[in-house]
Amino acid sequence: MTDTQTTTFRTRFGELRAAQKRRTGVPLYTLAINRPVGRVLAAAAPPWATPNVLTAVGAVFTFAAILALMLWADGAAWNAVIGLALVIGFFFDSADGQLARLRGGGSALGEWLDHVIDGIRMVLLHLATLAYLVRVDVIPDAAAYALCLVFTVAASSTFFAGELFTKLTSVTATTTVTARSRARSALMLPVDYGVLCWVYLLLPLPVAFTTVYALIALAKVLTSTALLTKWYRTLRREDAARAATRV
């Protein structure tokens, strides 16, 4: 790498550090690891690489891993590659948005595409996990179906409800990092998608994987219940306040 290239990378990296999204309410892994790695990928992206290109690269890693998990994973040693591919795919999921900010902002198409891929990934990953659990036969098939179904519902409902909540509420997310926001980020660590990706490195150990996957599913259900309750109460208060102003 030449000095000019090094300077360019450092300049881009510095600009990205100064243009980060809000930090409050973001799970700790995404905040401390995935975003910084994504920042490096975005700063190192060649001039011809658009944010949508990085989105596509991440999708290739993610969906290739999901396909392998669904069709071939059986507890063999090579299955750890599936987890690694999921981790890399999520790195690019952060890099595309950062590259968009580096180049002056993203597009409506790019944001839509990112959300479509997230929604599809969220469902397919747990369906593929179900195929793996049935194949390795660690738990009864009925338990595997129930576990993956519950995880899918908890993850997808929170994702879509959260996106709609941000569009319906008048509450503005704070950008100030406090001790409380740090604690909340740490508490959300078990339900961070990035942490779940690392769990798939345990695929060569079916019993260990199933145990950790089930614990994270439980954490996801509890967190989803708390968030849905909070969002419901917030919107109900806002509806009541708007109704009172019309009287």
Image (cartoon, rainbow, N blue to C red):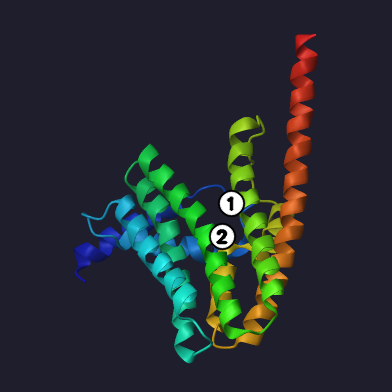
Label 1 sits on what residue type?
A: Arg
Task: Identify the image quadrant of the N terminus.
Answer: bottom left
| Whether residue 239 is visible | yes
Q: Which residue is mark 1?
A: 23
Could you classify mark 2 by the number of other residues whose Cα lies within 10 Å: few (under 14), some (14-19), or many (20 or more)? Answer: some
Location of mark 2 (residue): 31
Q: Quick check: 19 left or right of 148?
A: left
Tags 1 and 2 touching, CB below 8 Å:
yes
Residue positioned most to the top: 247
- For label 1, the crowd category at 10 Å Cα-Cα, with few meaning under 14, some 14 to 19 and many 20 or more, is many
Q: Residue at x 56, y 81 (%)?
A: 135
- Hey, which quadrant is residue 216 in on the image? bottom right
Quarter of the image containing the C terminus? Answer: top right
Q: Secondary structure at mark 1?
A: loop
Please count the marks in the image: 2
Residue 241 lies, in percent from the top left, at: 78, 21
Please tell me which residue lies in front, 123 or 243: 123
Disc 2 marks which amino acid?
Answer: Leu
Q: CA distance from mark 1 to mark 2?
A: 7 Å
The residue nearer to you, when weighing 12 against 224, is: 224
The residue located at (62%, 81%) in the rendering is: 209
